[in-house]
Amino acid sequence: MAGSHKRAVTSYDVAKAAGVSQSAVSRAFTEGAKISPTTKEKVRKVAAELGYRPSFIAQSLITRRSTLIGIVVPGLVNPFYAAILDELSHKLNVMGYRVLLFSMYRDDDTTPIMEEILRHRVEALVLVSSSLSSHFAQECQQMDLPVLLLNRKVDSQSVSSVTSDNLGGGAAIADFLLDIGHQQLAFIAGRDTSSTSFDREMGFRQRLEERGARPPLRDSGMWSIEEAMNATRRLMALPTPPDALFCANDMMAIAALNVAVGEMGMQAGRDISVVGFDDIAMSNWPLINLTTWVQPLAAMVESAIAVLKTQLENPQAAPVQHVLKGELVVRGSTRPQRC
């Protein structure tokens, strides 16, 4: 009949056709389940002939395991998040887990997302560059749900986190810009609620103060290309504009270059120096050639996987905070280093 739907093949249909029990069908599609090789082969052959595919949800109810890891990312506009997600998904896949992705849009409030996540049977939760309220941190602990912050941290020691050395990176960038002769530096921040932006700015400011340099000018790019371009325009319109810009991530640094070079006709590396943070692949493109702080992405993901393994095996394991070292890579967006 037109418009009718063909009934889906069930495990009962397979069991009946193969002459076995429904539980045998379930075991045939469950890794590590006790079933003879002959029966397993027979069931799978019949299932293929009938076009049967086991229900993931039904299997999770039987095994009491979803093998799902929830991952929250603040959108994928920034290629750094996409690269983390790609690496993290691959490592989790090797471990036998699948990713359930939740995307936020320029919003540090994870409450709506967390309400949705906790309705799913995820076995662990990874928040990439997103914060976690104390309320939900406590609720996750009560559920024995492992939680990990990646590229973000909170002041509380009750949640595990993996970050790069944002304070050290900010300080090293201050040293570098002073050493190549800059005098009026500026910082373009991300969101004020972001621990990564806060720490990068803190390290930058403290090192300038230690060396007796002027405090940096400041504006906010809100982790947005458009807002970072506006911030650059405001800074460059000051009576005494900066001669060097440190942006809290590479995307905002590229936005700053678009304004300084594309709109104002300046030459990066001569008229102005621009430094980013992350080392996304685009930063090494010849037309961009951005000096930036390299976040050790692969090492951060490896560390995150190690923490997750520990917490999945023992939900009561004590939270840990890992801070990994990065390095400055110097390219053409800054003045040449002095000999």
Image (cartoon, rainbow, N blue to C red):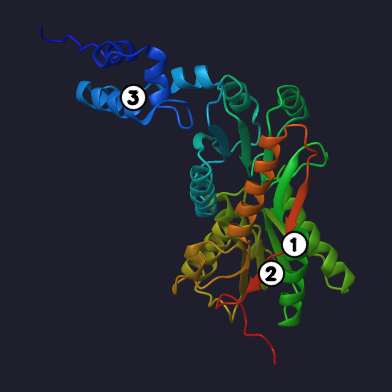
Quadrant assignment for the C terminus: bottom right
Q: Which mark is residue 39?
A: 3
Describe the element under mark 3 as helix, strand or loop.
helix
Mark 1 lies on residue: 217
* Labelled pair 2, 1 in contact (Cβ < 8 Å): yes
| Mark 1–mark 3 CB contact (< 8 Å) | no
Residue 36: quadrant of the picture: top left
Assign a secondary structure to mark 1: strand
The residues tagged by marks 2 and 3 sit, at their Cα atoms, a distance apart of 74 Å
Answer with mark 2 or mark 1, whichever residue precedes in sequence: 1
| Most distant residue in the top direction | 1
Q: Is residue 220 left or right of residue 316?
A: left
Q: Is residue 28 above or below residue 338?
A: above
What kind of residue is marked 3?
Thr
Q: Residue furthest left?
A: 1
- Residue at point 36%, 22% (across, down): 54
